[in-house]
Amino acid sequence: MNATTNPPLVTGKLLRIALWVAQVLLAVAFCGAGLTKLLTPIPQLSHMMPWTGTLPETFVRFIALVDLAGGLGILLPSLTRIRPGLSVLAALGCVALQVLAIGFHLSRGEASVLPLNFVLLPLSAFVLWGRSKRAPIAART
């Protein structure tokens, strides 16, 4: 192979396994957070997540739907191979969501809630990179 040709998109089994594990973990985390924020009454939710008690309920429920969409979107299109590129877009959305969440919590002096964001951010970025560049999933034909 000469220096001007690109290497094929063949990847190792370990990378593909790591991507699936990351996608499942992200789906569980985002869907779990989304369902919790969507179904738990705000007074009870504010005991678990104090910031939810200081914002309008509509905004908290909107964030719940965004979390849920991210969790479903990062896994289901890849799993079903129906429009798997949507998983890449969902991963991009999850990266953006985590960057915004980090900024939000820092602006409110809530550094104690950031560890989860600092786990979800690189996992989302890994899926974004892996599924867009190194191990994309082919659509069903």
Image (spheres, grey):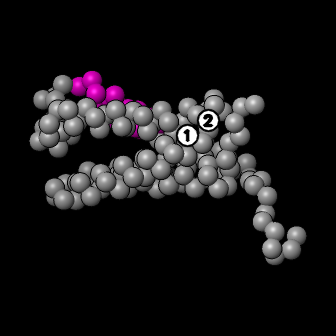
Q: Position of residue 8 (x, y in %)?
A: 79, 58
SS label for mark 2: loop
Q: Distance between the residues labelled 1 and 2?
A: 6 Å
Q: Quadrant of residue 65?
A: top left
* Residue 30 lies in the magenta-colored region: yes
Q: Which amino acid does label 1 sit on?
A: Leu
User: Number of labelled discs?
Assistant: 2
Is residue 115 visible to us here? Answer: no
Is residue 129 visible to us here? Answer: yes
Q: Mark 2 points at which residue?
A: 83
Q: Position of residue 10 (x, y in %)?
A: 77, 53
Give whichever of 82, 101 is nearer the camera: 82
Q: Where is residue 47 in the image (x, y as percent from the top left)?
A: 15, 35
Residue at 35% across, 56% down: 99
Q: Position of residue 83 (x, y in %)?
A: 62, 35
Q: Say if mark 1 contacts mark 2, CB within 8 Å.
A: yes
Identify the magenta region.
27-40
Q: Name the residue under label 1.
A: 86
**Which quadrant: the C terminus?**
top right
Q: Which amino acid does label 2 sit on?
A: Arg
Give whichever of 125, 25 is nearer the camera: 125
* Residue 68 lies in the magenta-colored region: no
Residue at 88% across, 70% down: 1
Give whichever of 14, 26 is nearer the camera: 26
Residue at 65% across, 44% down: 17
Q: Main secondary structure of the magenta part?
A: helix
